[in-house]
Image: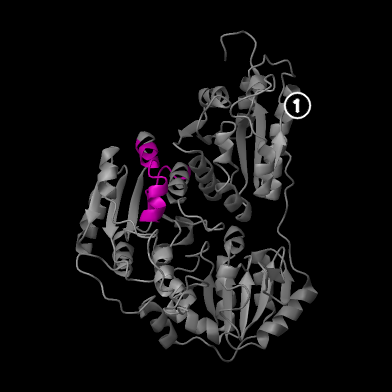
Amino acid sequence: MTNDAKPRVYDILARSFIQEGVSTCFALLGDANMNWGARMAQQGCRMVYVRHEHCALAAAMAYARKTSEVGVATVTCGPGVTQLITALPAAVRAHVPLVVFAGEAPLRMGWYNQGIDQAPLITATGAAYHYLHLPERMPVAIRDAFLQARRERRPVVIGIPFDLQDRPWDGPENLPTPSSQLLPRLSPIPPHPDDVAKAAQLVASAEHVVVFAGLGAVEAKAGPACRALAAKTGGLLTTTLPARGLFHDDLYCIGISGSFSTEVGLEYLAQADLVIAVGGSLAFHAGGGGQLWRKAKTLHIDIDPVAVSQGQEVARHHLRADARLGVEALTAALPARSTTWRTEAMAARIRDSKPDSHVFEIEPGKLDPRNVIEGLESALPADWELVNSSGHCSWFFAQMPSRPNERFFTLREFGAIGNGISFAMGVAAARPDRTVVLFDGDGSLIMHVQELETIKRHRLNILIIVMNDGAYGSEVHKFRSEGMPEDGSVFGYVDFAAIARGVGIDGKTVTRLEDLPTLVAEFAARGGAAVWDFHVSDKVVSPTIRRAHPPGKHKKA
């Protein structure tokens, strides 16, 4: 373990993490975490060494979501910790359990160049921070950090001065019982019969029912129950963006509800008189205030149903229950329905309508991003893992209706771009036997383009699709709608294919969509990593931006 016969504190700390079942850790090493990281690797943990601390945490977020385990990342003290501040709020708001091993400045020194009070920074994001300053208690504190992350479903950062880590271990030989053996085994919560009867009366009085599923429905495996409820009510199905694809093969699924709704989806949502929201938070961007279904009442089925979310009244009717058990009980309590909203013509329209039919003039040499997505939808294998980043381009990437939810990942709770490549690395580490496809924009990818080298070095099987409009897409379209100068939002078309080749992976600038089937077949046979750069027109504005920022919204004085 060490050159000395007696183990060091960092040896025991590494053993404590291994005992928690940690098999993958995303890391950027420095003085305050490097010895611990080395011991983690020696004890069998897969260490993914990234080039930026933010990327370590963001990758751990995706890994945790995909594996349903606690994600683990590590950074050094001071600047290593400050680099986490953008990613942490997203993990908090997305309820992602994480444990971060962060070093702290040495206690024995009166002054240290990288010393900073780290706790207030971390707690300001909503994450928890724990000082570990008593070596004998550190193994228990680590166990408790994993317990807290699992129970509260949020990040926990532990700070350990690196001079304490280097001390000989004088504590007990035996480690505490791991958190996985202490967690209570909670059974799904069934609904109360009185609440079911009341909800059934509400549903029976509605004519146009929409069953709206979120990630809670995915986690509870409530997809089949939601389909049965929609069928019995003669209603339609929809999902939040993270739950996209849960009903991908259902004829009466109108896709995503919220900012990424299709034209047909918006039309049918406006006709709804009852929305049954299952296992979701009813967030603002998912239509949670009723802005997309102004005529409808909302029934929320959840273990923690809400009336107000993100500043809006979202539901006045509630059924407290596990998503699957609640939907099944409600369906069983409903009488047979003589009339139905569903028709064969409706199913055909849902199937055949374009997500967005608005006409734009595409300049020569550029691609329409909607056509790019149609080509990728047709060419990419159905079993490849898809990662949707953020920014203006993400609306287009979300419109791939044939893809199942279990092969889709997105996390957008803090509205920050630049996370896509890290999320792709996390998914690739969680699904090493799969090909991962990252859909990203040029502004987002270039923020952490250095991680292409990490992908190459760790031999991660990732295909990166860049929707390159030479700008920050959301900002340039907002500027134009307001008649403002575009300076600061337009940067020109970066040659991402050349950057990819510079780090030793394949890079292509794709100009002909008819080449996609051949390109996909060649990549599938070769494997590895690649970047495909699609130069798209910056004249195509997503429906999200068009609705929120119509031309001339802000008149000149």
Give coordinates of residue 480: x percent, y percent: 39, 71
Classify residue 457 as left or right of residue 80. left
On the question of residue 529 being in view, the answer is yes
Above or below: residue 44 compared with residue 305 = above
Give coordinates of residue 412: x percent, y percent: 52, 58
Which quadrant is home to the N terminus?
A: top right
Above or below: residue 171 compared with residue 401 = above
Count numbered badges in the picture.
Answer: 1
The magenta stretch spans residue 445: yes
Q: Secondary structure at mark 1?
A: helix
Query: Where does label 1 land, which residue?
Result: 137
Disc 1 crowd, CA 10 A, few/some/many (<14, 14-19, 20+):
few
On the question of residue 177 being in view, the answer is no
Q: Amino acid at mark 1?
A: Arg
Residue shown at the point (46%, 80%) measured from the top left: 555
Magenta stretch bounds: 430-456
